[in-house]
Image (cartoon, rainbow, N blue to C red):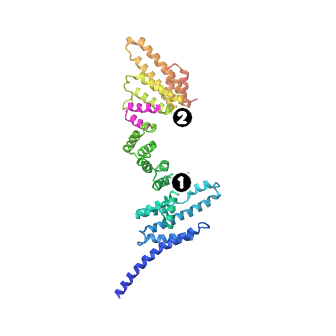
Amino acid sequence: MKKTLQLLVLAALPLLGVAQKAKVQNAWRALNDYESTLSDKPDFDYLKKAKENIDLAVAHEDTKNQAKTYAYKCRIMYNMYQFNLRAEQKKLESTILDKNARIEASYGSTPLTEFEEAGNALDKIKEMDPKYFDNIMEVMKGGNMPSEDDLKLANVAAQLKFESSNIAIGKYKNKDYEKSSEYFYKAAVMNSVMTGKKDTAGFYNACISAQKAKNYTKMIDYNKKMIDQKISSPYNYQTIYDAKLAQKDTVGALEYLKSGRKLFPNDVYLMNRETEIFLQKGQQDKALANLEAAILKEPNNAQLELVLGNVYDNIANPKGKSGKDTTKPADFDNLVMKAADHYKRAIDLKPSNQDSYFNALYNIGALYNNYGGTLQTQANNLPVAQAKIKGKELEAKSQENYKKAIPYLEQALSIKADDKSCMIALRKLYLLTGNEANAKIMSDKLKGGK
């Protein structure tokens, strides 16, 4: 009896395998039935039946490792996505009259579960049977003589690339930058595989979307992809630098900044970021060299002029660790004049940013005020023998600089009427130049009066 039972069990095993292969066949047959209805009225019941059968085949040991199983799954899931996409377009007809806008919107709002399963199935074919996958790629390119099923799979693979671009655009328009970055990247990779050419625009769009999503990991990965493929621009190095700083990876950020500066020595953005680092490290000479080079390339850049003026100002008026003024450099007067020249250029170019414009006006006012104060201190410290002639010259020059400072600070105050630093500086300057009436007005303003 035991032997009989054992023989019955053994005999049943091949039948189970046949049954599972039948699931694949049933999925194929239902899929073909569905495809035959596409030109008239798609019958979703066929597609539902195809999915039920292929899900069973994918789950069973006898068929889950066969490329054919995933070939049918890819086609079935893609058709399900297309069915949902058309339904979404139909739903939007009442709210979006323009056909192209409606299609674009539908790509942005249709769920992507089925589409992604189709893509995963294609990846599974590549993993399980690279030769078969390569054959499908050749069919897409117009090579080989395919069977009907292989041709249909090749068409779906081509559509997955095409649809990825559409989804990316739709998600971008919907401000879903996380998904748009992912799909621009997918489309770029697939396009590169299929055509053998590097999809610079696709990868760039992926980088832009990742930046808008503020996904620093994707920003780094996608921009590195462009660098690795040797299709980079200064933007790629700028973005990685900013992303790594946001991740507090200063060492990594500096590595990419250094590489970017080497490859693109004339890029102003990279030059400016490097300049900021030089300034933070107190390497003023290197900062000046960068800024001068940048201004040669952008002579009408008010912001660069403002920064350069500020660097000369800081070199002329060094401060110790406590923030107090330290000994002036030997070429102090020359440095002050250079700072003033660049502040004036910034003002003449009138930065569109009001804060920058205010800073240029305030900084040159403060520069002349501080220069006047330094000259007055020099006059006060002269030996008695020199005080009569040299002292009067320095005092006159001091007054001249105080008076130069006033109109700039007044203009700065007209931009920010509640800026107390401006009011305090002007009150002091009015008193120093003998204008007590205006000094009183400033005092009243500081007290909250009119």
Q: Relative to the observer, which residue lies in front, 355 or 416? A: 355
Residue type, numbered disc 2 = Gln
Residue at left offset 47%, top offset 16%: 396
Residue at left offset 48%, top offset 25%: 341
How far from the left and from the top, in percent, is residue 386? Answer: 39, 12
Q: Relative to the observer, which residue lies in front, 3 or 357? A: 3
The residue pinned by badge 1 equals 171
Residue 282 in magenta stretch: yes
How far from the left and from the top, in percent, is residue 321? Answer: 36, 32
Mark 2, Cα crowd under 10 Å, few <14 / some 14-19 / many 20+, is: few
Residue at left offset 44%, top offset 36%: 266
How far from the left and from the top, in percent, is residue 427? Answer: 51, 25
Is 221 above or below relative to 396?
Answer: below
Q: Earlier in the sequence, mark 1 or mark 2?
A: 1
Quadrant in the picture for residue 79 = bottom right
- Residue 270 visible here: yes
Q: Which residues are magenta?
A: 272-296
The residue pinned by badge 2 equals 354
Residue type, numbered disc 1 = Lys
How far from the left and from the top, in percent, is residue 19? Answer: 45, 77
Q: Nearer the viewer, mark 1 or mark 2?
A: 1
Side (left or right) of 227 relative to 352: left
Magenta residues, dominant SS class: helix
Q: Relative to the observer, which residue lies in front, 220 or 338? A: 220
Q: Residue furthest bottom?
A: 1
Q: Relative to the observer, which residue lies in front, 278 or 201? A: 201
Identify the element where label 2 is drawn: helix
Is 150 above or below relative to 315?
Answer: below
Is 100 above or below relative to 64?
Answer: above
The N terminus: image quadrant? bottom left
Side (left or right) of 417 relative to 218: right
